[in-house]
Amino acid sequence: MTEKVLVPASVRPFIIGTGGRNLKAIQQRSSTKIQVQKKEEAAGDDADDSSKPDYDAGEEESTEVTIEGDIDGVAMAKAEILEIVAERTKKLSVRLSHVNPDYFPYFAAQAAILAEGKDIKIRVPSLYKDPGDTLAPAITLSGERNAVQETKAKIEESVQELQRSYGSATTSIPKRQHRFIVGEKGKTLQEIFDITGCVVKVPPAEDPSDVVTLVGPRAKIGEAIGLSMTKANSIILERIDVSKAHGKNRGHARDLTRYFQSARRLHDIELNNDVQISVPSFKELFDENIPEVAYDIAGKTDESVKKARKEIVDLVNSIPPVCVAHLTGIDPLLHRHIIGYKGRNLQKVKEQYGIETLMPDETDGPSDIVLIHESKESYEFGPEESEIKSALDSAVNFFEDIRTKQADLVTKVLTIPATKHKFIIGPKRSTINALTGPESSVYIQLGPNKDRPSQSDDITEDSVIIRGPSAEVDSVAKKIEEIVEEASNQEILNSFSVKFDFPKKFSSQLIGKGGSNISKYRDELGVKIDLDDEGTVTIKGIKSNVLETQARIEALAARLADEVVLRLNVPIAHHSALIGQKGKFVKRLEERYDVRVNFPRSDESENVEGSDFMPKSKDEIVIRGPSKGAAKARDELLELYKYEADHGFNINVTVPKKALSRIIGRNGELINDIMDTTGVKIDIVRKETDDDASSIAISGTEQGIQKAKAKILEVVEEFEQFATQTIDVDKRYHKVLIGNRGATLREIVLLAGGSDDVSQQRRIIRIPPAGSSDTKITVQGNQEVVAKVINEIQRRVAELESQVESVIEVALEKHRFIIGPGGSTKRSIEQECGVTLTIPPQKATSKEIKIQGPPESVENAKARIIELTTKRERNNGPKKPASSGTTGATQSEATP
């Protein structure tokens, strides 16, 4: 028979293997003929329409694999090929370069939602793009293949919706104000998007256009234009052309600008005035087609901008052309000598002559060195012109002896095969860096410089160009020749080789998955290994390493020769327990005994009898490895099977589908707690049906299963008995129902038979916060408890509504008798009489004590207060005759 399989083109080399080894091994084991479509052929163009691909490659390019042989052989070869595909396509990375960058901010905001609960990373470029970034922006998705494909589909669906709902508009804003719309690293662009949902696109810096484009929801574009205008005009901007100073000397303005940047003089002005100063780029400074050298000053206030402008003018005026000199014609190779070790020469010139030295950018600009004399005093009171000239001349003379070394610069060209240039470079350029150290004036170039097309035709790929002082050039040339000779000798040293036979039937184990075993030998011992189709192994390298590799490979052959295949029958129902969670138990066996354990596949047709290592039935487990290790692994599996057979019980419990979330609990807390406390395994059998019931599978010991079932049914019963009711209660009674720190609420719940757990009590009764206008109290939980709680709240509210408020006057000095030590007497009256007493603070002048409660309770409290004050009077001894027959307390009443 013939079967065609479509696989991702990226997996093609792993199916074939190095030199076709993987493909040959599959053909030998399955006795089939396999053809893998070539790269240049279009995948699937000539495929039979009836053949269904075994792998959904999505938009990824596919390759067709054709398998010919008998039914069993084709099935075996197909299984091995798809196993390689599965291993190599677990992860997927997709770059959505076709998504319009205008939509990036939308997807950046949605990234967390799109990735929730998935093994996927979503990277969305920001609105701001660095000027030097030339890579086309794109959304990238990486992670588990199905998650990536699903997310990609959702993004593309959203793109179509955005295309329908988005519009665009343009407006003109002066070019120099564009940076205020962008903000620092795009912060203002992001702010505009956050407010309006619109993207603002400004032209690149090199584009002189003033046109700004806005893209986003059509209803919001007008708002975005207005906000962009506000941002652009929120900063005061002023331009000053410093080239107009000193007789419109543009070259001098250019030198000053470079110096100000180097010495951070403009930075100081920015800090002092809270402004931003923008100057021309290095390229613009040296572009003679640009007549001006203009600075842009941006600030939040007119005052700060004008002050900064004055400081710039003063700074430019303080350094006239007489304060500047140029050193020309000095070879860049000598610049390090001008600078000196760690800048010592430049520092010496600064300290002795007051001269700042501005070194050129050797990669972009001319090689002139600029010397600047900047007096610390104002120009009017600074040094005379003759003094400045003398200081500059002294600095020039200081560097003059270095110029003389330029006459000794020579160029030497060595011819060394380009294949050996790697020895001159060394790992991570370490060798060439050592040859051209910080104290050296030597320059080394390997092969022709592509940036200098005018160089001599004598320079070839084999050329090594050395330039510098003659003595140093000779020394470096000699060192290079020694390095190359030594490396060549090392190559000869690495030429030792051996050949020996390795059993052909074990070739795949020697190679390893994807060549991993061979690579391990190469990396660890630094040798080259080749295995041909006849089983001949060739090892080349340093003799000692070659012999060590040979010994290891021969030891591997001996171990493989001792390898056995053991088969044991275990009912498939127990296989998951033997495998362990995520294969934990099997992996431990394989690592401990150096064996491979193979369980049957879920598809019985894939359990091919033709392979030594494939199970022949759904119950068979195959162990392959060293004889002793395989026997020990078999014994452990059988022992575990016996235990599982004695303890492996399972049942299914039917529960309402709506109760599942309650059984699982928040983040799985409840169901995990049930499994931990009962020692069972619980699986939710999810079925895509309209049934109201769901099934829960419980497996473990018989006792553990019964306990878990009881707990689950208890949760279901609680769910079915769950009720929610609301009651409208006047806001003035809410605080009383809560009580001191929730004491009254807890009392109500306990009286109704509710839980004594504080956190559960809070969930049973929910009272709106104090600042809310809501008057409804929500009660939820067991139906019976909810009913009792409602009744109790109603009873207490009725009681509160029947309360009255009365006032009794008591002499201030007697308030302490009613309060008692630490308020004990007051609390006693309130508890015994069932009222609330309000006694004025100690320093108050009011004699009134308020009593609130049921009418009868209020009267009892009054009597108690009168009794306390009268009793205190009698106990305090004889009193002076009163002018009238009044007692120590008077009273009045009021109802709320």
Image: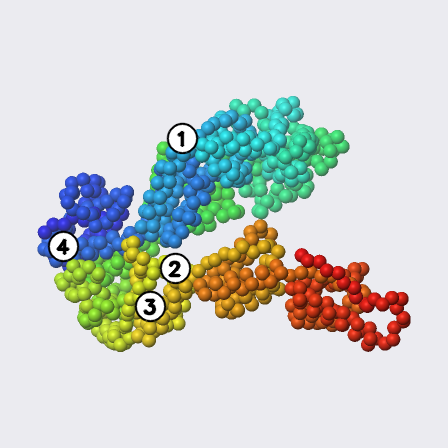
Dot 1 falls on a residue whose secondary structure is: loop
* Residue occupying image coordinates x 16% and y 66%: 617
User: Residue 629 in the image: x percent, y percent?
Assistant: 25, 73
In the picture, residue 257 is in which quadrant? Answer: top right
Separation of disc 1 and disc 2 at Cα?
A: 77 Å
* Residue occupying image coordinates x 52% and y 66%: 749
Dot 2 falls on a residue whose secondary structure is: helix
Q: Amino acid at mark 1?
A: Ser
* Residue occupying image coordinates x 76% and y 32%: 381
Query: Which residue is labeled 1 in the image?
Result: 454
User: Residue 405 in the image: x percent, y percent?
Assistant: 54, 39
In the picture, residue 801 is in which quadrant? Answer: bottom right
Dot 3 falls on a residue whose secondary structure is: strand
Front residue of this view, candidates 196 and 876: 876
Tell me the crowding category of disc 2: few under 14, some 14 to 19, or many 20 or more residues within 10 angstroms, Cα based: few
Is residue 826 depicted above or below 370 in this figure? below
Name the N-terminal-most of marks 2 and 4.
4
Q: Nearer the viewer, mark 3 or mark 4?
A: 3
